[in-house]
Amino acid sequence: MHSASPPPPPASALPELIVERHEGGVALVLLNRPDATNALSLQLQALLSAAFSELSADESVRAIVLSGGSKVFAAGGDIKSLVDAGPIDILQRHTERVWAPLERCPKPVIAAVCGYAFGGGNELAMHCDIIIAGEHASFAQPEIRIGIMPGIGGTQRLVRAVGKFNAMRILLTGKPVSAAEACHMGLVSLVVPDEQVLPEALAMARTIASMPPLAAMQIKEVVLAGMDAPLDVALMLERKANQLLFASHDQKEGMQAFIDKRKPAYTGH
């Protein structure tokens, strides 16, 4: 007689964050609080911080996909932990330190967004380098509706992504915008059918991971550093980074493979 299968663990026993390492240098980071619409609790933020610190230091990882699953990306902060907080409580949370490993991750990061990316969820997506959204995804900064404002880059990254007038409308009304509208205004990179979001993100991550990792990291670093620099300074950063890559084995390998009409074998050196 076969014994009965054990019951599934209660939701509270499941990890709030799942990290998977896929073939080809791709890592998947999955938010896993489905019963709380992936609200960014202090615990979940700490787990994200630790995961991105580890992935940043792992030379086998060349691209990262961040997902909230097929229903919701993240529906904002954990309001229950904020309602009685005072200004010193918020200051001492040091969210700038908690989020720094994601902000400073040298590897390309793709957000795979299904459903809501609201408040802290939208800010989380904007920490990434590419945003792939499902057709029914939506994006919002609704903090004004509960008497506060974004505090993890929502005002600053949003205005840099979509311009002052679109950002002001989103921030001051708190109303969501659709994936199609977000793509039109420059917040989203690509819109695909909902069921294709994660496969598309993983496929793009595999493509990026197949590229020379030093070049990918230099491109990311120069784009981010140059965004707020004067053009002549940004162009200088670009020239220096390009010059530096000519010291890499991957540059020699890539060009020789092109001449030989063969697939290059990049090592990250």
Image (cartoon, rainbow, N blue to C red):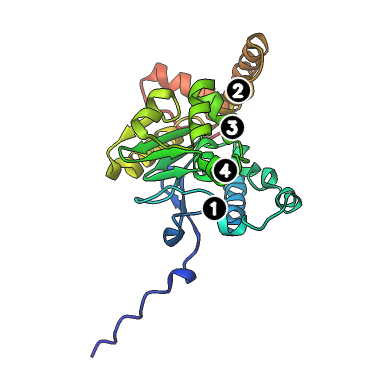
Q: Judging from the image, what secondary structure is the residue with disc 3 in? A: helix
For marks 1 and 2 on the same chain, the one whose residue lies earlier in the sequence? 1
Seen at 57% across and 36% down, the residue is: 154
Q: Amino acid at mark 4?
A: Glu
Binning the other alpha carbons within 10 Å of mark 1 as few (below 14), some (14 to 19) or many (20 upward) gives many
Contact (Cβ within 8 Å) of mark 3 with mark 4 = no
The mark tally for this picture is 4
Q: Amino acid at mark 2?
A: Val
Position of 109 compared to 113: left or right? right
Residue occupied by mark 2? 222
For marks 2 and 4 on the same chain, the one whose residue lies earlier in the sequence? 4
Residue 60 visible in the displayed image: no
The CA span between labels 1 and 2 is 30 Å
Q: Judging from the image, what secondary structure is the residue with disc 1 in? A: loop
For marks 1 and 4 on the same chain, the one whose residue lies earlier in the sequence? 1
Between circles 1 and 3, the one closer to the viewer is: 3
Residue 102 location, x and y as percent?
59, 42
Between circles 2 and 4, the one closer to the viewer is: 2
Q: Amino acid at mark 3?
A: Thr
Seen at 37% across and 44% down, the residue is: 114
Residue occupied by mark 4? 59
For marks 2 and 3 on the same chain, the one whose residue lies earlier in the sequence? 3
Residue occupied by mark 3? 155
Residue 56 location, x and y as percent?
59, 43
Between circles 1 and 4, the one closer to the viewer is: 1
Between circles 1 and 2, the one closer to the viewer is: 1
Q: Is residue 259 above or below residue 2?
A: above
Q: Tell me the tag on residue 227.
A: none
The CA span between labels 1 and 3 is 18 Å
Residue occupied by mark 1? 40
Binning the other alpha carbons within 10 Å of mark 3 as few (below 14), some (14 to 19) or many (20 upward) gives some
Residue 175 location, x and y as percent?
44, 37
